[in-house]
Amino acid sequence: MTDYKHENRAIRSFVRRSGRLTPGQKSAFSNYWDQYGIDYRKQKIEISELKAGCSEFKLEIGIGNGDALIDMAEKDPASFYIGIEVHQPGIGRCLNEISSRSLPNIRLISHDAVEVMQHMLTDRSLHRIFLFFPDPWHKKRHKKRRIVNQQFRDLAYRLLKSGGCIHLATDWQDYAEYMSSEFLADQRYINCGNSEGFSARPEYRPETHFERRGLKLGHGVWDLLFEKG
Ligand SMILES: C[S@@+](CC[C@H](N)C(=O)[O-])C[C@H]1O[C@@H](n2cnc3c(N)ncnc32)[C@H](O)[C@@H]1O
């Protein structure tokens, strides 16, 4: 697992949250990481070896506690899911849940998703990329931290198969409008939604923890789907 505390580099889309691991989460790392985790390294992973028998390969970025990832993987055993998250307690919780449901089609990576996309995932290997309720960084001075930017669009484009799709969702109107304008302006992507770039929530996307939080605050929810042309 990566220690970002003393590191000094590019602007990242997250800050290290302190959040201690509970004893249960700690033991999840010692008991299940070898089975369900993949250590970060600057080397491409061989996807065909990982996805044993699955026909599609899907990536979720910023899984939080992994609720959506687990739900989707359980209902879609023909696909192999990779979840990326930097928040250790979330990974710990997710490991416990994967193990208790004996899900064979999930692996987790605990590292900055941008670097994983750059260095570990292979070009044209993904059928879907999910980014659900990314940190909104809504203050003006923080907007540069938003994970969705030109670099992210380029990476997603590179990793998606032709006809593959990126699915984004947020409860922040300003972020929704920002993401739709970014993708609508990018000629490489085909908008699967209405003229504003918004789609109805596909059935496979469960309600997430941060979505519920947003709804309690009276926020709306926006889903965006863009296909690699
Ligand atoms: C607002 S939470 C949403 C969590 C979950 N998707 C949900 O809807 O409940 C955003 C999550 O993205 C993670 N995150 C942000 N930037 C990341 C990055 N570059 N790499 C991996 N995880 C990241 C954060 O740690 C956080 O858990």
Image (cartoon, rainbow, N blue to C red):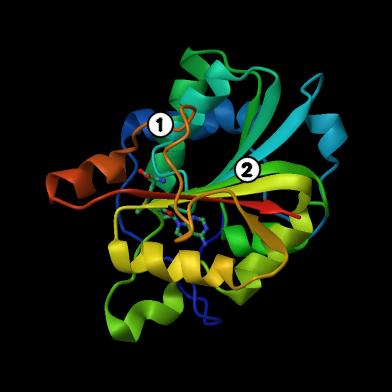
Residue 45 at what x, y percent from top left? 81, 46
Which residue is at a point 76% across and 45% down the rendered structure image? 163
Identify which residue, 178 or 71, lies in the foreground: 178
Q: Is residue 15 visible?
A: no
Q: Secondary structure at mark 1?
A: helix
Which residue lies under the disc numbered 1? 67
Left of 23 or right of it: where is 199? Answer: right
Residue 197 at what x, y percent from top left? 49, 58
Identify which residue, 223 or 49, lies in the foreground: 223
Instruction: Reply above or below: 35 against 22.
Output: above
Which residue is at a point 68% across and 60% down the rendered structure image? 189
Judge: label 1 CB < 8 Å from ligand 1: yes
Callout 1: 10 Å neighbours few (<14), some, many (20+)?
some
Which residue is at a point 29% across and 51% down the rendered structure image? 19
Identify which residue, 8 or 85, lies in the foreground: 85
Q: Residue furthest bottom?
A: 141
Which residue lies under the disc numbered 2? 59
Q: Amino acid at mark 2?
A: Leu
